[in-house]
Amino acid sequence: MIKDIQEKIIKLKKEKNICILAHCYQTHDILEVADFTGDSFGLAQKAAAADCDGVIMCGVRFMAETCKILSPEKRVYLPRSEAGCPMAEQLDVDMLRQLQEMYKGYKTVAYINTTAELKTLCDVCVTSSSAVDIIRKMDADKILFIPDCNLGDYVAKQIPEKQFKFVSGGCPTHARITVKEVQKAKEAHPNALVLLHPECQPAVTAMADYAGSTTGIMDFAKKSSAKEFIIGTENSIVQHLSIDCPDKMFYALSKDCFCHNMKITSITDVLHCLEGTDGEEIILPEETRIKAKVCIDEMLRLGQA
Ligand code: 13P
Ligand code: SF4
């Protein structure tokens, strides 16, 4: 059944010249039909470079918006319009304006998990895998980092020469992981390395053998000579790694590390989106798109510098 749906998707996407991009938190059956899978930074780069007429973004709304910002000539679709990132909507434009008023002289750095509207007010955009490198390269010493204070803390610790201000936002999926859960997992699997995402709380991230983006975690586990890993990010990564590396053992750090928004999209939704019977085409006002693009372009430029 799933195979039949996948075959239909592969045939249709070729006929319609549509490229399927999928974040690594999507289910394995979706990753199998995607033209590119990766973390937020990889998806942003692919969105800018993809040679096709349309893109289906299997992920959450801010990822589809990023894709549209970078590729206005392409039709960009989100298979399920309810798929949003709660963190991306924690701040609105008025709240950010107030913060910028409060912290005059600070450059605003937006985690890519923000709405297109918020990005219009930001100087530079970053992803979990690019944040340290980009902020180090920025020609500014005072940084207002929004909205994830946990990722912000992780970045600030690695760049002590710069001054940071945060707001109290974060990812509900990662922030719920506790120190106790890490201790329990380590007791249960004493030979395993702990790999986790810097969206976790600082005390949790401090217990990691490796902290990085979803792609960073997967690459680390694949290249490592270790055989056992405790994974502290969305639990789909445990499933993908178990399939990709059958000779290694992967344990979920927390059974609750599940992003409902990332999991709303099913393989059937992808097919319906391709068939044109469901899904939302992302439309952004041109003024918003152009202003929001400035901080993403700056990320891509500094990333290459
Ligand atoms: P990365 O893809 O940058 O690792 O981010 C994880 C995430 O939570 C995306 O919403
Ligand atoms: Fe947003 Fe967290 Fe879900 Fe990523 S995992 S989409 S940051 S809620």
Image (tube, rainbow, N blue to C red):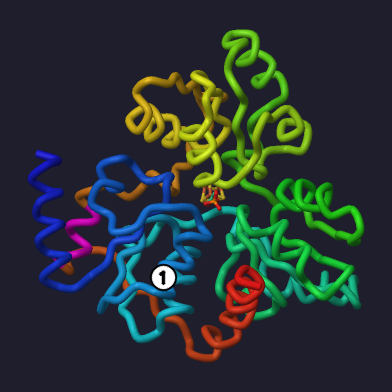
Q: Quadrant of residue 118?
A: bottom right
* Residue type for callout 1: Ala
In the image, 180 versus 239, the foreground residue is 239
Direction from residue 28 to residue 169 in the image, left or right: right
Give me the residue at 10% from left, 70% from top.
15
Direction from residue 167 to residue 4 in the image, left or right: left
Image location (x, y in percent) of residue 47:
41, 70
Which quarter of the image is occupied by the N terminus?
top left
Q: Which residues are magenta?
A: 269-275
Give me the residue at 69% from left, 73% from top.
124
Q: Quadrant of residue 88?
A: bottom right
Give me the residue at 71% from left, 35% from top.
205
In the image, 258 versus 231, the foreground residue is 231
Crowd band around label 1 with a 10 angstrom C-alpha radius: few (<14), some (14–19), many (20+)? many
Magenta span: predominant SS is helix
Query: Is residue 27 shown above or below 301?
Result: above
Which quarter of the image is occupied by the C terminus?
bottom right
